[in-house]
Image (cartoon, rainbow, N blue to C red):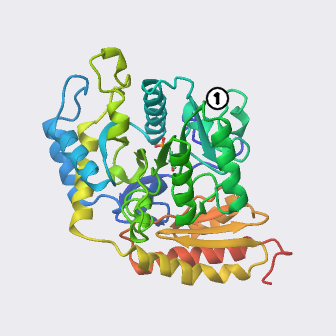
């Protein structure tokens, strides 16, 4: 096991990882047959739970037919069909689907699209981006530069990566003015604004409202820059709508980003794949007689047919049934709110199938995790948050079990001076 260099892990001090030999529904299964409810859905991805028979059948069939083929100069039905369905589902004229192999790469592609777009519009100086405090957009160097330079886990690389612009989310007058000011002052530099709509993920599990998202959209329009929605975490009904930007539909004006990034749940947690979807205006900037004007990008495993077939199968499932994400949200709210009374808890917040407990003074998170595992629940706390993002198909009993485990493990690991208020 020592040959494996594990993610986000101090190899010297971290205890050995939990060994899993199989998955089943919403469960991880250990070597000795132990079963843990996966409250993380493997980092938001296993939206239909594991080993769904429909997804498995699609991938198995595709494996026998054609596991992979290069996408340069070649196309195949699983990719064509998936692109078509994603374009149908995405708002407005977000119709041009570029495949890549992970969310971070989808973000890099979005950056290249935006830079190329402005080059075409005679603004070649627009090579930088604006993102928000507590943003998280991925682990590759371009995507890292978009993450909050102080608060993110990439802070120690901040000297080595491109400096971008970071401001507070425009939640009020003052922050809206600051966003406007920076966009105006650097309008010769800023190619686009990256936002995780409504839910900021790995930068702190923070939520914002539809009005804030509208202000961002309006500011992008005022300053004629691109709005890039990173829905790698929020896509595919995590917040109750297919995409988080769809929450703006009911309230009238729909926010249609210029570029949309999707990943994580795209293949229902089966395979690594992501997409960057562009509006026609962005696509047209690369549509030219000059071969040099093309979008120069193409990962080796782009549009992998196995991943495309998993994604198509996942969309079939979403077409066939609708998950009651509102019910998951109300269970999480009803159950986790008791932790508001704990002195050391600064916030309990739930939105869609996301439940977050934020601490003032985080307890020993390793102990919290051990307590959870003992109670048959897998969660991975990080920073000052303990959170759950379960599979959307989770049954009520299992969700209650996750909540029980969260509540009990918080109480068990509280230092003596942090008792109930
Ligand atoms: C996970 C995530 C990414 C990065 O995706 P990877 O597939 O891990 O590279 C980017 N943005 C957001 C919002 C994410 O949650």
Query: Residue at the location (39% across, 57% down)?
Result: 46
Outermost residue on the front side: it is 222
Position of 398 with respect to 170 (left or right) is left
- Total tally of numbered discs in the picture: 1
Residue 248 x %, y %: 44, 65
Given residues 30 and 255, the one toward you in this image is 255
Given residues 175 and 35, the one toward you in this image is 175
Other residues around mark 1 within 10 Å, as few (<14) / some (14–19) / many (≥20): some
**Mark 1 — residue?**
162
Position of 261 with respect to 134 (left or right) is left
Q: Is residue 68 above or below residue 395?
A: above
**Tag 1 secondary structure:** loop
Residue 26 x %, y %: 39, 66
Position of 290 with respect to 382 (left or right) is left
Query: Residue at the location (21% across, 67% down)?
Result: 320
* Residue 9 visible in the snapshot: no
The C terminus lies in which quarter of the figure?
bottom right
Callout 1: CB less than 8 Å from ligand 1: no
Query: Residue at the location (55% across, 72% down)?
Result: 350
Residue 183 x %, y %: 63, 42
Residue 305 x %, y %: 23, 38
Outermost residue on the right side: it is 417
The N terminus lies in which quarter of the figure?
top right
Q: Is residue 338 above or below residue 359?
A: below
Query: Residue at the location (29% across, 43% down)?
Result: 307
């Amino acid at each position: 096991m020592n040959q494996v260099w594990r993610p986000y892990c101090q190899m010297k001090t971290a205890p050995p990882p939990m060994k899993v030999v199989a998955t089943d529904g919403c469960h991880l299964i250990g070597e000795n047959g132990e079963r843990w409810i996966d409250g993380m859905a493997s980092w938001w991805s296993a939206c239909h739970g594991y080993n769904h028979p429909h997804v498995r059948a699609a991938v198995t069939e595709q494996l026998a037919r054609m596991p992979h083929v290069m996408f340069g100069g070649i196309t195949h039905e699983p990719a064509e069909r998936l692109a078509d369905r994603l374009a149908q589902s995405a708002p407005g004229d977000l119709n041009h689907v570029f495949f890549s192999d992970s969310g971070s790469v989808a973000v890099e592609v979005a950056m290249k699209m935006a830079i190329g777009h402005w080059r075409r519009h005679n603004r070649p100086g627009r090579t930088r981006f604006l993102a928000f405090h507590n943003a998280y957009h991925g682990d590759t160097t371009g995507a890292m530069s978009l993450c909050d330079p102080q608060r993110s886990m990439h802070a120690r690389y901040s000297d080595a990566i491109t400096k971008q612009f970071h401001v507070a989310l425009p939640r009020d007058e003052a922050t809206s003015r600051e966003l406007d000011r920076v966009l105006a002052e650097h309008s010769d530099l800023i190619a686009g604004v990256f936002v995780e709509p409504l839910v900021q993920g790995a930068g702190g599990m923070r939520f914002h409202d539809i009005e804030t998202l509208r202000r961002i959209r309006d500011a992008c329009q005022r300053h004629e820059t691109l709005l890039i929605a990173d829905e790698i975490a929020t896509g595919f009904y995590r917040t109750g709508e297919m995409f988080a930007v769809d929450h703006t539909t009911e309230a009238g004006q729909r926010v249609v980003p210029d570029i949309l990034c999707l990943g994580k749940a795209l293949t229902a947690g089966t395979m690594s794949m992501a997409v960057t979807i562009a509006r026609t205006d962005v696509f047209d900037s690369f549509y030219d007689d000059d071969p040099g004007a093309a979008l120069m990008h193409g990962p080796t495993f782009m549009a992998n047919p196995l991943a495309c077939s998993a994604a198509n199968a996942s969309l079939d499932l979403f077409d066939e049934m609708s998950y009651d994400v509102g019910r998951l949200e109300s269970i999480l709210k009803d159950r986790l709110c008791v932790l508001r009374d704990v002195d050391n808890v600064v916030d309990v917040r739930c939105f869609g199938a996301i439940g977050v407990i934020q601490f003032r003074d985080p307890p020993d998170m390793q102990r919290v995790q051990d307590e959870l595992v003992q109670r048959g629940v897998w969660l991975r706390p990080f920073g000052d948050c303990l959170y759950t993002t379960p599979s959307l198909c989770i049954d009520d009993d299992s969700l209650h079990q996750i909540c029980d485990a969260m509540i009990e493990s918080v109480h068990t690991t509280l230092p003596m001076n942090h008792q109930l208020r």
